[in-house]
Image (cartoon, grey):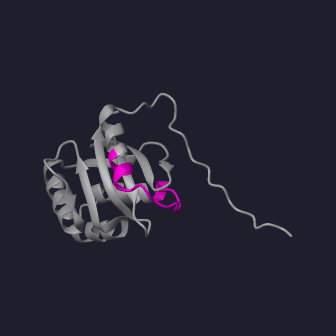
Amino acid sequence: MSRPVTARAEVPSWPSGRGLSTAEARAIDDMARRYPSVGRRMPVSNKQAELFLSIWNEPDADVRLGLIVSALDRDCIYDDVHRDGPCIGHSQFAMFITEFREEANNMVFSLDGDVESVRDFARIHFRVSRDGNPFGNGTYFVLQAEDGRLREIFGFMGR
């Protein structure tokens, strides 16, 4: 009697030389405590990360809202080190991005290397440029929702 073949997913390790800051490690630990039974869906892809980053770059508010709906869970939570508190849901995140774009004119976000995923969690490195000149970089830690969209996003500037 033959046994069914089971696929075994490879779990990427954190690359050497990219250590976690204390704040980054706390964010991951916090997500893991709140979601101890996360599933084993497909890892967050570069394409998903690029879709999320394209939200920051889109000048048209209606198109941007469509990107938000495509990339983020309806009840998504977004927070970063520059905010006083999280954005919850599509409408709050859309308002935040609109305000950000008004203040940070001509900034362009782009993926900086491949997404690193472990089950439903991922680390996304990004670059920011302004008028074609490097401006900064950062990292997002994300948690994927059941449908593959991003449920929680925590951002840190610098590495």
Check the picture and name the quadrant holding the C terminus.
top left
Residue at figure coordinates x 84%, y 68% from the top left = 2
* Depth order, front residue of 159/126: 159
Q: Report which quarter residue 56 is drawn in.
A: bottom left
The segment highlighted magenta reads 30-47
Residue at far right of view: 1
Residue 60 higher or lower than 20, as above or below? below
Residue at figure coordinates x 43%, y 68% from the top left = 146
| Left or right: residue 6 compared with residue 69 | right
Chief secondary structure of the magenta portion: loop
* Depth order, front residue of 3/49: 3
* Depth order, front residue of 47/87: 87
Report the number of numbered marks.
0
Residue 51 in the image: x percent, y percent? 39, 60
Residue 42 in the image: x percent, y percent? 53, 61
Residue 131: say if magenta: no
Residue 20 higher or lower than 123, as above or below? above
Residue 91 in the image: x percent, y percent? 19, 68
Residue 31: say if magenta: yes
| Left or right: residue 40 compared with residue 73 | right
Can residue 132 be seen in the rendering of this structure?
A: no
Check the picture and name the quadrant holding the N terminus.
bottom right
Residue 64 higher or lower than 141, as above or below? below
Can residue 154 be seen in the rendering of this structure?
A: yes
Residue 4 in the image: x percent, y percent? 76, 67
Residue at figure coordinates x 36%, y 69% from the top left = 70
Q: Report which quarter residue 126 is drawn in.
A: top left
Residue 57 higher or lower than 74, as above or below? above
Q: Report which quarter residue 74 is drawn in.
A: bottom left
